[in-house]
Image (tube, rainbow, N blue to C red):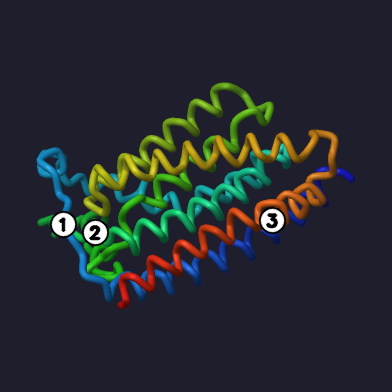
Amino acid sequence: MSSDPIRGKYTIIALWFYVGWVIVFILEGLLAQTLSTRDLTSSLDRQIPLVPLFVWFYVLCYVFPFILIPMTTNWHRFNIAFLSIALCTLIGFIGHIGLPIAFPKPQPGGNSLSEQLVRYIHSHDFLPGAQNFPSLHVAITWTVFFACLRQGRPKLLEGILLIATLLIIASTVLIKQHLFIDLIGGTAVGFLIWWVTSRTYERLIGDSDQPLNALRFSARKMVPALTACVVVLLIVIGAQLI
């Protein structure tokens, strides 16, 4: 099968997954905003300045995953990213519900476009918050970057993607959407889940296997892990609601 039909099919898969992810994230946010929260703002967080210009890197995260479509030549790497994001999301939800964190967000004083966008994002969150630790913004951004590696692309392009990744991650604390502990948690989840998922996938699938068949096969094999995460999430939700 040529790369173009595969790319088209993966584009459809990515769009459907994205739509489903957004719906689930909104539902989780509606639940998270009803929980009692705690403020874990540290002295480091108080020293980090509000830099409204970084809001443009922050919103870049919402389209950053789609860079995988043109970047990918090894679709097995895409499969690993797909499975990793699913696991990261479930683990992130467990953290959001189990340790609901909210904190006061300083507002920019000016009226530039960047400052207006920061205020818009702050005001349209699921207030008072709770979707913070670990930061899925950070975990998913790392996952996308890892998937873009070993694609046979120029090192310069990989370097640019690394810079974009670091800017997106830094933006989470520089526009005061997350605390530093959220950033660390998101990084830990992103690295750990990518490592576990890639090692598991490599044991299950050979590089010669057809990628779409490999995605279906590996997804079935990961059902127990995904189910375990869902069970833990339901237990955590139950504990919070009782």
Q: Secondary structure at mark 1?
A: loop
Q: Residue at (14%, 58%) from the top-left corner?
A: 107
Image location (x, y in percent) of residue 2: 87, 44
Are discs 1 and 2 less than 8 Å apart at CB? yes
Distance between mark 1 and mark 3 Cα atoms:
40 Å
Q: Which residue is mark 3?
A: 11
| Nearer the observer, 88 or 7 | 88
Does the CB distance between marks 1 and 3 fall below 8 Å?
no
In the rendered image, which residue does mark 2 sit on?
A: 101
Q: Is residue 66 above or below residue 188?
A: below
Residue type at mark 2: give it. Answer: Ile
Question: Mark 3 or mark 2: which is in front?
Answer: 2
Disc on res. 39? 1
Identify the amino acid type marked 3: Thr
Identify the image quadrant of the C terminus.
bottom left
The residue positioned 64% from the left and 34% from the top of the image is 199
Q: CA distance from mark 1 to mark 2?
A: 6 Å
Residue 76 circle label? none
Mark 3 and mark 2 lie on one chain; the one further toward the N terminus is 3
Mark nearer the N terminus (1 vs 3):
3
